[in-house]
Amino acid sequence: MTKYFLLFFLFIFLKPSVNAQVYINPGVDTTDQNIKGAVEFYSKYMSEFKGRKLPDFTKYWNAEDCSRLKVPDRGVYGLGGDYPIYAMAASKTITYVKPNTDGTIVLKTIGAIVDSLKNMEVYYISKHFLKKEADNKYHFISLLEHDKTNWKSQKIRNVNYAFKKDYPFNKAKADSLITSIVALEKQWNLQPIEIEYILTNTYDEIQSIKGFDFTLGLGNADKPSGMADINDKIVYCAGHGENYFHEVVHVYLNPKHPKSPLNEGLAVFYGGSMGKPLNWHRERLKTYLNKHPEINLNKLEDFWQMDNYTNPNSTIQGILCHEVYKRKGIDGLKNLMRYESLNEIFEKEFKFELKNLNRDLRELIGG
């Protein structure tokens, strides 16, 4: 998952909000009863996000989305991970509410915190679609539902691809993904999982589908990236086409060992990262460490970002998986995923002394 380093930063350095408020920006016409009703409905919905606690989505979302998805609001985990993005923002400001001719209402919100120096740190700009029914009750609909006439789908084995009508679907790449999935199922003795696979060209498009005009991490150079929704078995792929195996691995294997510190590394081992294989990232990491002897891997948690193309944390995790698989095969890899701490892995699987971790890890990375 390409936003892994960003999530790590958020949970280490930022404090998610537990008492978020919703403000209304000047210019939003709350004298319009339709707009006022939409704002009140949205504000009540936001008030139910408290820590990891989620609302009863059936009170807020249309029946079709609720029947298909455990979390019909695709934006809840907008940065990946398991912490709702809405709960991170202490300040939510509604900036835009517009009734459309099709009967829907678009409502946009800036989610942010304000630091001690009164600077605003924006986490997201969200976009929700609401619809008012004949009984005057509102509900949300997903962007995909609202825009469904512009999308098409194609199912191959257990993967249901969804993509814009003008997208040139590549069946050969899809077949390649299926080949990898079948091999994974055989290795891990798993049954096929029905997966929804959303195909886009850019990460901006992924976040738009999830209901955002902006999230942390947008605005950088485009590169292959993706996200996996483990709850609802959804893969979002940007710029890597029909064969982003990395995210599919998350859907299949994360639930088998939820406490493992190596879930991201396992996906990198099997499916690479950002469109490149593990060995490519390993070589870049080795070169970077050789140029930066001051980096102390004894404090591995401090080395969470290298550049925008290789994540050192997930690369090191992938290397650990690769080295164990090389020595012990699939049974060794399965046993590796049973550990619940990296230190235990270093000491028991690699016989490293933690005081010499910087030296030993550098040697391991160098191959």
Image (cartoon, rainbow, N blue to C red):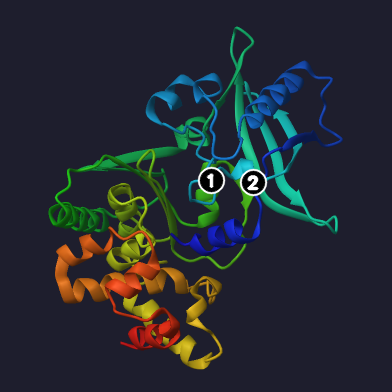
Q: Residues within 10 Å of mark 1 (few under 14, many from 20)?
A: some
Residue displayed at 54% across by 61% down:
8
* Secondary-structure class at tag 2: helix
Q: Amino acid at mark 1?
A: Tyr
Cα distance in 3D space between marks 1 and 2: 8 Å
Would you identify the image quadrant in which residue 161 lies? top left
- The label shown at residue 88 is 2
The x, y position of residue 98, in whole percent, is 72, 30
1 and 2 marks in contact (CB < 8 Å): yes
Residue displayed at 49% across by 51% down:
80
Would you identify the image quadrant in which residue 50 lies? top right
Residue 319 in sight from this viewpoint = no
Decide which of 358, 114 is in the foreground and name it.
Answer: 358
- Relative vertical location of residue 256 with respect to residue 304 in this rendering, above or below: above
Residue displayed at 30% across by 58% down:
245
The x, y position of residue 220, in whole percent, is 59, 66
- Relative vertical location of residue 162 with respect to residue 307 in this rendering, above or below: above
The x, y position of residue 103, in whole percent, is 62, 21
- Mark closer to the chain start, 1 or 2: 1
Quadrant into which the C terminus falls: bottom left
Horizontal side of residue 168 vs 66, given as left or right: left
- The label shown at residue 101 is none
Would you identify the image quadrant in which residue 149 lies? top left
Decide which of 169, 306 is in the foreground and name it.
Answer: 306
Q: Residues within 10 Å of mark 2 (few under 14, many from 20)?
A: many
The x, y position of residue 322, in whole percent, is 26, 73
- The label shown at residue 83 is 1
